[in-house]
Image (cartoon, rainbow, N blue to C red):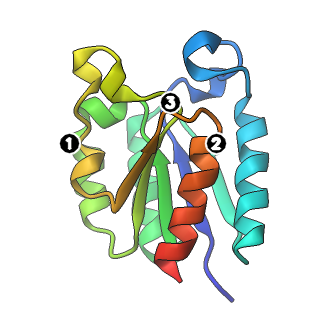
Amino acid sequence: MRKPIYVLNGPNLNLLGVREPDIYGKDTLADIQGLCERRAALAGCTVVFRQTNHEGELITWVQEARTEACAVVINPAAYGHTSIGLLDALKALDIPVVECHLSNPAARESFRHHTYVSHVAAGLVSGFGAKSYELAVEAAAVLSA
């Protein structure tokens, strides 16, 4: 049986639908999880969907993905701009990594223009709201086939 795609979410994404809906949309994280599960099922995959506000926990999940996942979709949120530890964990993976953002970081504040995750990601999907996740899961499924 095919290993799942890990869909990992960083800090404050548990507040989707409430926090800055003009930027991040009105979909909740539960709504996005459902979208990811449906898109993965169309590709014959499953997902493990997680969110944390703790950098170390996110790194632990990335390390777990080394043996338990076929690919990783990651919305690192703020940790993408700050965490070399997360970058180092992602560098240890030999499975595809797809970076995902609801908004387009390149169109926002200058400190959001660079992410460490982009150094190791096969690709980046951003700016399409919740649809970014669907596209990222589809890409991960294709890359891991």
Which residue position holds label 2?
131
Q: In this rendering, which labeled residue sits more in front, label 3 or label 2?
A: 2
Which residue position holds label 3?
53
- Mark 2, Cα crowd under 10 Å, few <14 / some 14-19 / many 20+, is some
Q: CA distance from mark 3 to mark 1?
A: 16 Å
Check the picture and name the quadrant holding the N terminus: bottom right
Q: Is residue 121 visible?
A: yes
Which residue position holds label 1?
84
Earlier sequence position, callout 2 versus callout 1: 1
Which residue is more in the foreground, 96 or 50?
Answer: 96
Q: CA distance from mark 3 to mark 2?
A: 22 Å
Relative side of 39 to 86, left or right: right
Q: Residue at x 63, y 71 (%)?
A: 4
* Label tally: 3
Spot occupied by residue 51 in the image (x, y as percentages of width and height): 59, 40
Earlier sequence position, callout 3 versus callout 2: 3
Using the image, determine if residue 84 lies above or below residue 42.
Answer: above
SS assignment at label 3: loop
